[in-house]
Image (cartoon, rainbow, N blue to C red):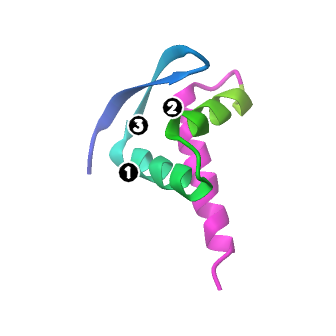
Amino acid sequence: MSGVRKRSVSIHGHRTSFSLEDAFYDLLLDIAKARDVTLAALIAEVDETRDRDSNLSSALRLHVLDWVRNAGNNRV
């Protein structure tokens, strides 16, 4: 199991950082690829829609969790 890693990305013209475990980061990359968007665009979308009382790292984890749950509902 990997520890939390701090990562940086440019969104809306400024650098921001977030901390995620490798497993969450890898799934974010998979989501971006499946949606045919850049990782930065996906993170910007999550950032724009997150509850302002939560931090970006938590919002990203919840986005991944929601994606995985919804993917499970689409299995035949």
Which residue is located at x 68 percent, y 72 percent?
A: 73
Q: Which residue is mark 1?
A: 23
- The reply to whether the C-beta atoms of the residues labelled 2 and 3 are less than 8 Å apart is yes
Q: Secondary structure at mark 2?
A: helix
Identify the main secondary structure in magenta. helix
Q: Which residue is mark 3?
A: 20
Secondary structure found at label 3: strand
Which residue is at the far bottom?
76
Residue type pointed to by label 1: Ala
Q: Up-down: is 74 above or below 21?
A: below
Question: For the residues marked 3 and 1, what is the alpha-carbon distance in whole angstroms?
Answer: 8 Å
Q: Label 2 to label 3, Cα distance in Å?
A: 6 Å
Q: Position of residue 29 (x, y in %)?
A: 46, 49
Instruction: For the C terminus, give its image quadrant.
Output: bottom right
Instruction: Residue at 51% x, 31% y: name it.
Output: 57
Residue 46 got which mark? Answer: none
Relative to 27, is 69 above or below? below
Question: What kind of residue is marked 2?
Answer: Ser
Q: Give coordinates of residue 69: x percent, y percent.
A: 62, 62
Identify the residue under disc 2: 57
Label 1's element?
helix
- Upstream in sequence: badge 2 or badge 3: 3
Please say if 44 is above or below 29.
Answer: above
Q: Position of residue 60 (x, y in %)?
A: 55, 38
Earlier in the chain: of badge 2 and badge 1, it is 1
Magenta segment, which residues?
A: 52-76
Q: Which residue is located at x 34 percent, y 45 percent?
A: 22
- Badge 3 local density, few (<14 within 10 Å), some, or many (20+)? many
Please report the residue visible at 37 percent of the width from the left and 28 percent of the height from the top: 7
